Structures are given as C-alpha cells and as structure tokens.
Amino acid sequence: MPKADFLKNIADQLCEAIPSNLGTLKKDFEKSCQRILNSAFSKLELVTREEFDAESKVLLRTRKKLEELEKKLHALETKLKSRQ
C-alpha cells in the first residue's frame, strides 16, 4: 500500500470517530490529521514494503557475489602458497 494511501486511511479512520453532524469540523480535522501524520511519518524515514523487498533482493545478490569472490580469493591464495 503506498504511503499516501496508508496515511489517508488512518486519517479517515480518525475522522469516522467524529460524529457526522459536525461536518465542517470533521473536514478540518481530516486535513489536519493528514498533515500531521505526513509530517510525523516523513521524519521517521519509513520505506514501503516494495522498497524494502527490492533492497532485500539487492542485498542477497551482493551477498552471493561476495561469497563467490571469497571462494576465488581463497583458491588463488591456496594456489600461490602451493607454488612457494
């Protein structure tokens, strides 16, 4: 769920708690909630699930490449020692 939709959903839920006969107050409260939540969540530097999953895949590929390089280095060191 995109961050904007998530925040709007929270603001909507908060507004549902206000009685419907307070129409103008309810709309003002909803706008204030969205603004406050956007500000608070932007300070937390949160990422979406999609961004997290993408970075996890990059990390996995990097880890595999590192393991391959470590094996090659070990093989080269072994070969070098055997020549000495």
Image (cartoon, rainbow, N blue to C red):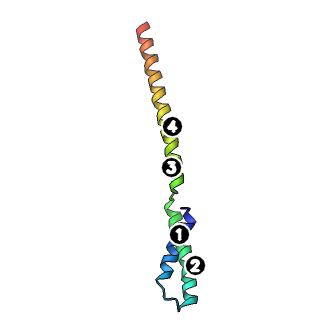
**Which quadrant of the rendered structure holds the C terminus?**
top left
Label pair 3/1, CB-CB below 8 angstroms: no
**Which label is found at residue 31?**
2
> Tag 1: Cα neighbours inside 10 Å, few (<14), some, or many (≥20)?
some
Q: CA distance from mark 3 to mark 4?
A: 13 Å
> Tag 3: Cα neighbours inside 10 Å, few (<14), some, or many (≥20)?
few
Mark 3 / mark 4, whichever is N-terminal:
3
**Which label is found at residue 7?**
1
Q: CA distance from mark 1 to mark 4?
A: 33 Å
Of tags 4 and 2, which is closer to the observer? 4
Q: CA distance from mark 3 to mark 2?
A: 31 Å
Residue at the location (56% across, 89% down)? Answer: 23
Label pair 1/2, CB-CB below 8 angstroms: no
Q: Secondary structure at mark 3?
A: helix
Q: CA distance from mark 1 to mark 2?
A: 11 Å
Q: Secondary structure at mark 1?
A: helix
Q: Is residue 36 above or below residue 24?
A: above
**Which label is found at residue 53?**
3
Q: Which residue is mark 4?
A: 61
